[in-house]
Image (cartoon, grey):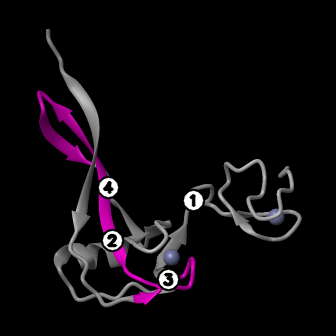
Amino acid sequence: MIFIAGVYPKQKKLEYNAGPNTCSSCGRYGSYEVYVEYNSFSIFFIPIIKWKKRYFAVTTCCSERFELDAQIGERIERGDNTQIRDEDLIRNEGFGRVKYCNSCGQPLDPGFTYCPKCGAKQR
Ligand SMILES: [Zn+2]
Ligand SMILES: [Zn+2]
């Protein structure tokens, strides 16, 4: 018996055209791009089960990625005129996390070994 089955994560961009907001990550004016992500289980490439959806908001100013409250995500997907508020954003630990120079406090990309501002070696 040939049995082709697979789980495919799918991602779709949603329409979200609310006006600019102050970014909760970098404080600049920006807007969000909203994505929905779900896994579907397929047999013979026919999706039969769709898992629980997860929604993400990505800031256009600094590309910070947040997980979005599922209720808000569903409303955006339905096309409701929903405004994303700071409290709807769930910070994903370890994702796009900023660390700070242990010498001068400059925000650093987590991959940096040396601070570009003061040159101090990072732990
Ligand atoms: Zn930002
Ligand atoms: Zn520094």
Main SS category, magenta section = strand
Q: Position of residue 56 (x, y in %)?
A: 39, 65
Residue position for label 3: 23
Label 1 residue SS: loop
| In the image, residue 91 lies in the stretch drawn in magenta | no
The CA span between labels 1 and 4 is 18 Å
Is tag 4's residue or tag 3's residue first in the polypeptide sequence?
3
- Residue type at tag 1: Gly
- Residue type at tag 2: Glu
Is tag 3's residue or tag 1's residue first in the polypeptide sequence?
3
Q: Which of 99/55 is in front?
A: 99
Instruction: Give the vertical position of 46 relative to 99 (above or below).
Output: above
Residue bounds of the magenta highlight: 21-50
- State which mark lies toward you, 4 or 3: 3
Residue position for label 4: 37
Q: Which of 80/59 is in front?
A: 59
Q: Position of residue 57 (x, y in %)?
A: 40, 69
Q: Is mark 4 within 8 Å of ligand 1?
A: no
**Do tag 4 and tag 3 residues touch (Cβ < 8 Å)?**
no
Label 3 residue SS: loop
Residue position for label 2: 33
Q: Which of 86/28 is in front?
A: 28
Is tag 3's residue or tag 2's residue first in the polypeptide sequence?
3
Residue drawn at (56%, 77%), measured in percent from left and top?
25
| In the image, residue 39 lies in the stretch drawn in magenta | yes
Label 4 residue SS: strand
Q: Which of 41/37 is in front?
A: 37
Residue position for label 1: 96
